[in-house]
Image (tube, rainbow, N blue to C red):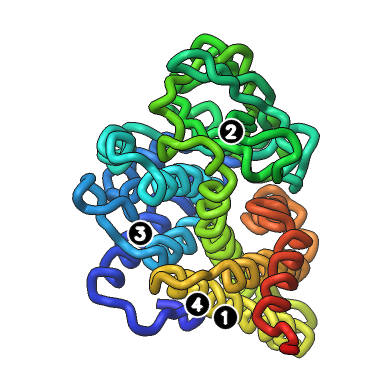
Amino acid sequence: MARLAQTAGLTDIQQEILSTVRDFVDKEIIPVATELEHRDEYPQQIVDGLKELGLFGLMIPEEYGGLGESLLTYALCVEEIARGWMSVSGIINTHFIVAYMLKQHGTQEQKDYFLPRMALGEVRGAFSMSEPGLGSDVSAITSKAVKDGDEYVLNGQKMWLTNGGTSTLVAVLVRSDEGHPEGSAPHKSMTTFLVEKEPGFGEVRPGLTIPGKIDKMGYKGVDTTELIMDGLRIPANRVLGGTTGRGFYQMMDGVEVGRVNVAARGCGVAQRAFELGVSYAQQRHTFGKPIAQHQAIQFKLAEMATKVEAAHAMMVNAARKKDSGERNDLEAGMAKYLASEYCKEVVEDAFRIHGGYGFSKEYEIERLYREAPMLLIGEGTAEIQKMIIGRRLLEEYRLQG
């Protein structure tokens, strides 16, 4: 077992789950990840293996057929999976956020209907906030739901759905103005709809089109798509929680745990980059000795390892805080910000250690170099994290009198 990124105080069950996942990553993911990534191929065999391990139900309560594990266990599993191939952790993360939102905010009927099948991986989740023109400004959403009898009619275009094609359930955030007069705060007129669909591309149910995969620099294999609603009819019992106007809060709760997940991904990718760098530095010789014996390289390794350790500690702290029932938006924002920035830096240092070979598609570090930037923007950009952190600090340290 590696010396870095250890987590103190885990139960025997947590250790057993993690060791099973690490074993799966080493045997089933790392050997095939780069080849699948270069082909931009969906990792169906890996996903089937994760289903068998029960990972799609990791945090779903036992009464719905899940494992009922903590956010910490989940985050540590994500860290291991991202160490193998970050795209796979994305396939699980969006599913898990939707399951979490259902568990926390769904009606009893919605939980009974969706969660047992989500735990088995039969129903696969995706969620959709962003739109082509709004970036980080969620309050500027223009997609709309209008009530028509016992149904709502949804129109609009959404962007950046991870699992957009392969999912069968999408939690979609749209504006619904009923009961919210003109001029009321934008976030109070938003509703999350649970939209069921067929997997695939094109018109996947009447009024709902998934045009195709967006071609990306990295984060390949997983399908990232748009979603177009044109007269999409959704029954009123598919409003998450049964009440309109709560969508913004529900989504932000989901994103808060999603930020711990992105921090965990950053930790996993950084760990793998360190492993590749420290291994290559002991094999490559210059000036008559392994480059690991040159002080310049040792300094790099020292900095990389320290960043891996620091990011892991912050991520674990954020997960434990949420598990204890406390508010963790400050810790999750800090962990996501630090882990993604450090991940980029550790990957770049490993890339530099590889020299010219880092530029070759034969070496795994080339793939990590293209994957790391996604973490700087996923689940809220670094700038958004800093805004959240700054506001929360001013709340905590407000001058009295």
Q: Quick one: SS at disc 3?
A: helix
Quadrant in the picture for residue 325: bottom left
Labels 3 and 2 touching (C-beta < 8 A): no
Q: Which residue is mark 3?
A: 21
Q: Earlier in the sequence, mark 2 or mark 4?
A: 2
Which residue type does callout 3 highlight?
Answer: Val
Within-10-Å neighbours for mark 3: few <14, some 14–19, many 20+: many
Q: Is residue 243 visible?
A: yes
Q: CA distance from mark 3 to mark 4?
A: 21 Å
Within-10-Å neighbours for mark 1: few <14, some 14–19, many 20+: some
Q: Nearer the viewer, residue 271 or 364?
A: 271
Residue 309: which numbered mark, if any?
1
Q: Is residue 344 left or right of residue 170?
A: right
Q: CA distance from mark 2 to mark 4?
A: 40 Å
* Residue 37 in the image, given as x and y percentages of width and height: 59, 41
Q: Earlier in the sequence, mark 3 or mark 4?
A: 3
Which residue type does callout 2 highlight?
Answer: Gly
Residue at the outermost top position:
206
* Residue 79 in the image, given as x and y percentages of width and height: 49, 63
Q: Which residue is mark 2?
A: 179
